[in-house]
Amino acid sequence: MRSHVSSNGNIVIKDTVTKQTTIQKFTVMSQTCKTHALFNATNLTNFKYKLSGNLPEDKVAEINSMLDNKGHADIKGRVRAILDQHVSLEFSTINPDAKGKYVFLENLMLVDSMLPQIISHLLVMSYSEDTRLLDALTDKLSELNPIGFPMKTNKKQYEAKVRRFVTDVALGMVPGVPWEAAHQSYGMLVVNTKGEIDCYHIVYRKSLEDYLYKNLKFETASASRYGFGKIETGPDGSQYFMLNLQLRFTK
């Protein structure tokens, strides 16, 4: 099978066995410049958590005012300060769109019914643990098994679901559009640091999953822009906190 890349991200595939020629759309990513995001932050990627117990107002004000050395909201510091109060962050929901539809939540549930909870745990851990690497955090989550999966014979419950998620994102799933598992691309083209093109085709799904799973990390977007990272009191009197999901390639 031979291929060449066109400027619009499509590939002309020539099958030397069947003699057929097809044009297939690929996601394009370059390693020759600043690392790219696989999954970009939006208001729709905010995960909402309920604090397991309300904190005093003075402690809330203290946590909400924590800044990093650049003067930005210190999300890591705020998450750790909440947990230091022996209060846990319990997943509540994901932001709806402007019409009140929970598109991203339902997209995740289509991939796997427990995926929203899994990602919510990983998000918190990306601030509470000393790594932000997707694979390392998923391994840690598997050890903790907070969801209580039966894992006596299959230890890959969390990893398999996370792999499925990042692969679907690479193949076209976005937060604001209903996902029907109909892949919008046939794989990923990666321009490596040598200027060579690595092709990960959906036919060879395992190699695509491996590349994504082992080369992604959580990243913090702008808290002020996307409205997350503050303890707020909801209509029910409970306190809530939001974290934003963004995934970037490590190289």
Image (cartoon, rainbow, N blue to C red):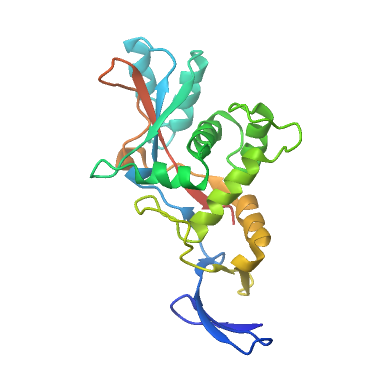
Is 109 or 58 nearer to us in this picture? 109
Residue at the right extreme?
Answer: 153
Residue 233 against residue 95 in the figure, above or below: above
Residue 234 position by quadrant: top left
The quarter in which the C terminus is drawn is bottom right
Residue 78 against residue 159 in the figure, above or below: above
* Rendering coords of residue 18 (x, y %): 65, 87
Residue at horizontal 55%, vertical 31%? Answer: 125
> How many numbered dots are placed on residues in this image?
0
The quarter in which the N terminus is drawn is bottom right
* Rendering coords of residue 181 (x, y %): 48, 57
Residue at horizontal 60%, vertical 26%? Answer: 146
* Rendering coords of residue 116 (x, y %): 48, 37
Residue at the bottom extreme?
Answer: 19
Residue at horizontal 35%, vertical 19%? Answer: 239
* Residue 209 appears anywhere in the view: yes
Residue at the left extreme?
Answer: 99
* Rendering coords of residue 17 (x, y %): 69, 86
Residue at horizontal 64%, vertical 28%? Answer: 145
Is 235 or 123 nearer to us in this picture? 235
Residue 187 against residue 94 in the figure, above or below: below
Is 197 or 2 nearer to us in this picture? 2
* Residue 192 appears anywhere in the view: no
